[in-house]
Image: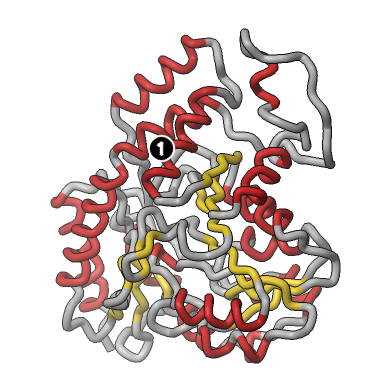
Amino acid sequence: MQIPFHKPYITEDEVSEVLDTVRSGWLTMGPRTLQFEQEFSKYVGSPHAVAVNSGTSALHLALKAIDLKPGDEVIVPTMTFTATAEVVCYFNATPILVDIERDTHNMDVSLIEKTITPRTRAIIPVHYGGQPCDMDAIMEIARSRGLYVIEDAAHSLPAWYGEKSVGTIGDLTCFSFYATKPLAAGEGGMVTTENGDWAERIRVLRLHGISKDAWKRYSAGGSWYYEVTEVGYKYNMTDVQAALALSQLRKLDFMWERRKYITKMYSEGFSGSEAITTPTFRPDRVSSFHLYPIKINPDALTIDRAQFIEELGKRSIGTSVHFIPLHRHPFYRNRFSYDEKDFPEAEWVYERLISLPVYPGMSNREIEYVINSVNDISTKHKK
């Protein structure tokens, strides 16, 4: 049995949508992209949704919308993918890393205020694995200190904090549609916001700073005339990507239910194990269940995390590690003088983390195989 870490849930619906788009002759940004924006906006509940070519682009343009400047600071959790902090560096601004909660792996809100300086402009909470951060506390800090909140929701579609859908809480929210994400369009991203001025600026910035709907100039009713109002980027989504995304959006609830079921089966299957700590889910929020990160207990095992992953690989089970903390990477360590001792919780978590497969197309037999394999390895290598 071969179980990859992830496999997008692609059916004939996606194939049909893409073929229809290709046959239409409209391949770049056009009517399908606009349709996707409208349907996504309705699904999430945000008045404005702007499609771009990646989650990284979404974060970049969100920071551009708030006019981040060189020398500014942005608070970011260390347990995230580099894109979250990388975009801050695009502005010659400084990502200020904070440690995480040991159980949820989300940023530790209690550490935020002590990192705020007169140069701080924004906070980027990352909803790890799809479980929202403590957004009430983060928004309260931000409002009291005049800061912006830009949510990194690359994992969080759909997810809810209380009764609020992720995408409607912070000042701006950034989603990713990379191949491994809950909605997989190969590549792609989205920015949602209640601020119409920001949304309009992001629409302009995503396509070379050209005013109005630049793509319309290639349509029958469009005009050849356009104006460049500021330096922009080539960040637009294509209609081929949007066709994939539209089909994925329509089965998003089903895929969420399936990941939720797999999560439940895993947690039940590993309950009582001294070797495995299962994910913690807070009762006041609902995860997208995008990741299932277990933590191994080195005190209960004769093998370490790398060897555990190797043992799973021998059983043809794909895994990953989310994430190597940013402070460990040479760029952030050397450029900003970050030290491992300043992030004890992230260090503790990182040494134990393994992400198991949790994609919607997994069969019940495959789920049971993963559970049995993890438990078998734990038993065979018990201290």
Whether residue 176 is situated above or below residue 123 in the rendered picture:
above
Q: Is residue 25 left or right of residue 230?
A: left
| Within-10-Å neighbours for mark 1: few <14, some 14–19, many 20+ | some
Q: Position of residue 90 (x, y in %)?
A: 78, 57
Give the residue type that dot 1 points to.
Answer: Glu
Residue 102, picture quadrant: bottom left
Q: Position of residue 45 (x, y in %)?
A: 40, 51
Q: Secondary structure at mark 1?
A: helix
Q: Nearer the viewer, residue 24 or 161?
A: 161
Q: Nearer the viewer, residue 39 or 324?
A: 39
Residue 93, picture quadrant: bottom right
Q: Nearer the viewer, residue 249 or 165?
A: 165
Residue that mark 1 sits on: 39
Whether residue 249 is situated above or below residue 77 in the rendered picture:
above
Whether residue 195 is situated above or below residue 26 in the rendered picture:
below
Q: Is residue 311 visible?
A: no
The residue that appears at 77% across and 59% down in the rendered structure is 67
Q: Position of residue 372 (x, y in %)?
A: 17, 65
Q: Position of residue 120 (x, y in %)?
A: 73, 77
In which quadrant of the rendered image does the C terminus lie? bottom left
The residue that appears at 67% across and 77% down in the rendered structure is 146
The residue that appears at 20% across and 82% down in the rendered structure is 273
